[in-house]
Amino acid sequence: MMETEVLRVLETALLCADAPLTVTDLRSLFEDTISGDDIRRHLAALQLDWQERGLELVQLASGWRFQSRPDMQRYLGRLSPEKPPRYSRAVLETLAIIAWRQPVTRGDIEDIRGVTVSAQIIRTLEDRGWIETLGYRDAPGRPALLGTTRRFLEDLGLRALDELPALEGDEATEALGVLAFDAQDGSDTGSGERAATGADDAAVAEGEDVDGETVRADAPEPTPGESAASPETDADADDPPALGAREPE
């Protein structure tokens, strides 16, 4: 088969697919008569062909797909005037800790943030498909070890966790803004969470409940980049392999 025809087939399949396609999926288009290395070479050629267009071909944790470029979002947003879901700073901080420190337990998150993490925050992230239970720590009560999912990587446009930027403190929370979050928005998210505002900060100083959480008076200044001070350390657990660390086939 001519190379131009191979490119046409790959391009058509990727544009028509409802989900990312792996190299194995793409090889099946040619009844496995083309090697995986050749498929990757053709995909690289397609990336070059589309580099000046509004769509781009990207590799994610679960495969390859075409998606709109970031600078096109402000135009595409006019086709769908509905506002994206808003998430509170409490939700963002919890997600940042899980993403950068995983696997972690709720106790680890509470030690880092300095507040009691409400079950609603965890449920919000689970319902969105961004976190899941990876296992259980060998400790009293066998607390669940939380980590991110492939869906989280796809929504962030990443192939693997090691592509997360090396950030510390509040920078980790701010980096999640690419998911169309707005931590400073005062509207409800539909899940019982509200954004952390200046009033909330004042409440924190007084030890009041914020976003369903209770500030712990003996807790250190919470920053997602800090390591957990919990006596249950990551070394106590059988850590599962990081999600998305291997290139999909």
Image (spheres, grey):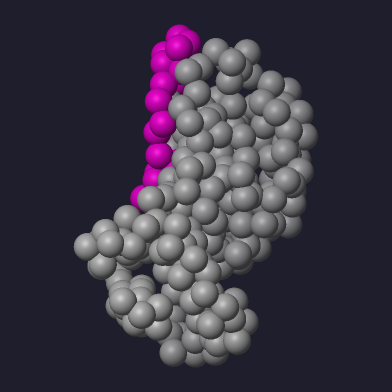
Task: Residue 40: give x, y in percent of width and height.
Answer: 46, 62
Range of the magenta residues?
121-143
Looking at the image, which residue is at 51% across and 17% down? 237
Tell whether position 142 is magenta: yes
> How many marks can you see?
0
How far across and how far down the image is residue 240, in percent?
46, 27
Q: Is residue 238 above or below residue 47?
A: above
Q: Nearer the viewer, residue 14 or 134?
A: 14
Residue found farthest to the left: 31
Residue at 44% across / 74% down in the picture? 66
Q: Quadrant of the N terminus?
A: bottom left
**Is residue 74 positioned above or below 85 on the image?**
below
> Can residue 90 be seen in the rendering of this structure?
no
Residue extending furthest top?
A: 140
Q: Is residue 61 visible?
A: yes
Name the residue nearer the viewer: 104 or 154.
Answer: 154
Give me the residue at 73% from left, 23% from top.
Answer: 218
Q: Residue 6: x percent and y percent?
A: 35, 76
Q: Give the image location of residue 166, x and y in percent.
A: 73, 46
Q: Is residue 42 left or right of residue 222?
A: left
Q: Quadrant of residue 12?
A: bottom left
